[in-house]
Amino acid sequence: MPTVSKSRPEATVARGGERSAQTAYARIKQRILDNDYVPGDSVLEQVLADDLGLSRTPIREALVRLEQEGLVTVVPRHGMRVLPLLPRDMREIYEIMISLEVTATRFLAQRRPTREEIVPLIEACDAMETALERDDLIAWARADERFHLSLVELSGNKRLAAIVMAVWDQSHRARMFTLRLRPKPVDSTREHRAVVNAILAGDAAGSAALYQAHREKAAVTMVALIEQFGLTRL
Amino acid sequence: MPTVSKSRPEATVARGGERSAQTAYARIKQRILDNDYVPGDSVLEQVLADDLGLSRTPIREALVRLEQEGLVTVVPRHGMRVLPLLPRDMREIYEIMISLEVTATRFLAQRRPTREEIVPLIEACDAMETALERDDLIAWARADERFHLSLVELSGNKRLAAIVMAVWDQSHRARMFTLRLRPKPVDSTREHRAVVNAILAGDAAGSAALYQAHREKAAVTMVALIEQFGLTRL
DNA sequence: TCACCTATTAACGTATACGATAGGTAATAC
DNA sequence: GTATTACCTATCGTATACGTTAATAGGTGA
């Protein structure tokens, strides 16, 4: 599940079964996204276990999941290694996000949703606008995330949504890092609203095209920034 | 490998880097794809462990991976449950495959590959043709798979390829099952070759369109078949 | 000084142990 | 006959134990 950091800090309680493995997964993942574990360096299983007050068993279970999500690799005698994000990785991630999100947009528009159905998108736009006025980039990023994840959720394709969320998480650190490096996303909100309107109008092709343009612009900016600032490993 | 392996050198190894957990993962997955484990029924962890001659530890590790790949769910006191494939699931899977494979095609064509580079595609086409002449549907399915997987591999986007492979596996049972139910894929080969030619010509938009049409036709056929034959759970 | 070999040890992968508990079963009440 | 409850057992989740193996350091010879 994607997480713009501490949107809901310890909201992960009240789960049905309170399994340590899940807790371990969530907490380690949070630390990776928050950059508490710096990409590139390794943490031994026993260290993680001591750190979370557990045995290695649930830790290993968590690591298997994190590895398959593409956040870490587990190297036999070096523990968990947080994967750095190369420009190449960012390109891959954006290609996937664009492809799937554009598809999601097309399907959503085709379904001709009511305004009621897409309030999450509208609210996310509002939140982005408000955040920008306040110069609160963190809040803007959260709203942006809400927009994108709501969009793929509304597509109705659960698998598609899950995949987008996974790659979204993979690129979370990069987004946070570049947040202050890129020009304020002033026309971003306008573009988002245009997409929403096209969806409401049931214009599948149009909304898809608008969204694709929007996302490709973002992708170019992001990759350029990363390369420009020499953030060869994030 | 486990305990007894010293006195009795099993052919199955634990030599060097070969870990039991990986073996367990591969073998259980194979059984699911081969329909040895029927969708819907459950297998307890201990049964799996005894079956593979391992302890529960590597089994659990394998199950975590299989669960995240969308092949099974692990229900606390009912072990591993093989997920049935509903028509709805097939639609989701095809939406994702089409979206990503079309993207892959576009990127590949844009790169203007040499004929040398795309021999896997050409060979897969040849193999499909040969198999059809021999009425060997299994061989045709294998060649078809090779075509699709080669295509996404050639896109150069490793993540994209991995995702397509994952959903491909999820739908494997359905493809095998409908193999004899659908009309012989006679024009399929022609369509594949048309895509290859468009890629060779560097026609990004054209190849993408051709491929999309091809895949959407397949999707419609497949979903219709599943619904028609009342295979509500595969 | 450096290459190479050996010994030590630390980390891993797997096995086993164990307490907790969900779910089934049988007994009982209605 | 049906529903309810209490008990019992099987299965799970986690902890711990154990043998294996790779990394490293230290020693030896050139």
Image (tube, coloured by chain):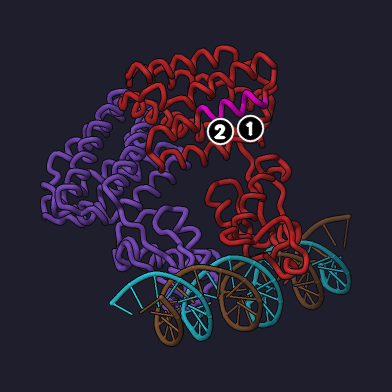
Chain colours: A purple, B red, C cyan, D brown
* Point 64% across, 61% down: residue: B14
Rendering quarter of residue B105: top left
Looking at the rendered structure, the kind of residue marked 2 is Met
Quadrant (top left, top right, bottom left, bottom right) of the C terminus of chain B: top right
Q: State the image coordinates of residue A194 (x, y, percent, origin top left).
A: 21, 32
Chain containing the residue with disc 1: B
Residue name at image x 66 percent, y 44 percent: B30
Q: Position of residue A30 (x, y in %)?
A: 36, 64
Give the amino acid type for the residue marked by disc 1 in the picture: Ala
- Which mark is drawn over residue B90? 2
Q: Is residue A18 visible?
A: no
What stretch of residues is rendered in magenta? B138-147
Q: Position of residue B12 (x, y in %)?
A: 70, 56
The image quadrant where one finds the N terminus of chain B is: bottom right
Asked if both marks, 1 and 2, belong to the same chain, the answer given is: yes
Q: Is A167 positioned to the left or the right of C6 in the image? A: left
For mark 2, name the chain: B
